[in-house]
Image (cartoon, rainbow, N blue to C red):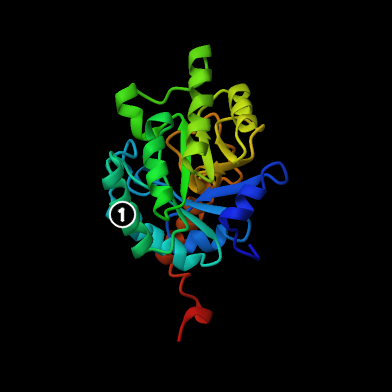
Amino acid sequence: MSKKLTISSIKQAKGVKSLVMITAYDALFSKLVSESADMILVGDSLNMSFAGKSDTISATLEQMIYHTNAVCMGAPNSFVICDMPFGTYIDKERALDNAIKIFQQTQADCVKIEGGQDKADIIAHLSANGIAVCGHIGLLPQSVRSEGGYKVKGKTEEQRESIIADAKAVEKAGAFCMVIEGTKADVAKEVAEAVSIPVIGIGAGADVDGQVLVFSDMLGLFEAFTPKFVKKYLDGATLVKNAVKEYADEVATKAFPAEEHTY
């Protein structure tokens, strides 16, 4: 991006342009995606994408700080969001202590926490103490074990009302934007219309204020499964495997290194 976004410019984008968010976990990929993305999310999804775990829950604050620093190094002109991992914001005091660590030890522009009405007091406490917060409502990956899996939200009238109330509570508490995940598209549309801050969707339809995807999903690097909401813009896994096989074959036949690769 030619100019780094600010909290104000992100809020002002609502109704004007659709915001582009993508995950990155290192300097290499953050530099590559920074040319097109408005915001880079250092998601605790790295626990699955990078560490091979079955969910995000065991990601630690130290991991998030390490990867956020790498992303900030690779994309110094990008707006960077750091996920607060599971267990780091169970109360206002712990949340503020851990958010301060992220702000002091990285160049992250904000933190992201999962939860709606139940986390409004924590969002308000962070906001009142100089910590910018991106909310996260709908399907909450950090709650996957307690809910018995990844379940689409907004299927019942009760869920619809609860999600809209969550969005309003997150906005009122001081968040400048929020992610809505795994939610019926019609409900997500109502959520976006119910608040004055941008609502970024993932598996929540097109009628929101922007989209976010995990880079390894959209580049086709993750082969285990493809969520319904993911579009693969590249068959990355096949391209990488073919390139490595070509390298291996050339090493075996001594075609590599050739004269032009030799001192």
**Which image quadrant: the N terminus?**
bottom right
Is 51 or 153 nearer to us in this picture? 153
Q: Is residue 224 left or right of residue 98?
A: right
The residue at which mark 1 appears reads as 63
**For the view shown, which residue lies furthest in the front direction?**
128
Indicate whether 115 appears above or below 159. Answer: below
Residue in the image at 31% along x and 58% along y: 101
Residue in the image at 39% along x and 48% along y: 126
User: How far across and how far down the image is residue 139, in percent?
Assistant: 45, 29
Indicate whether 75 appears above or below 229. Answer: below
**For the view shown, which residue lies furthest in the bottom direction?**
263
Indicate whether 201 appears above or below 250. Answer: above
Residue 187 lies in what quarter of the image?
top right
Amino acid residing under circle 1: Gln
User: How far across and how far down the image is residue 35, in percent?
Assistant: 62, 61
Indicate whether 200 appears above or below 203. Answer: below
Q: Is residue 34 left or right of residue 225?
A: right
What element does badge 1 sit on? helix
Q: Residues within 10 Å of mark 1 (few under 14, many from 20)?
A: some
Residue in the image at 35% along x and 28% along y: 144
User: How far across and how far down the image is residue 170, in percent?
Assistant: 48, 36
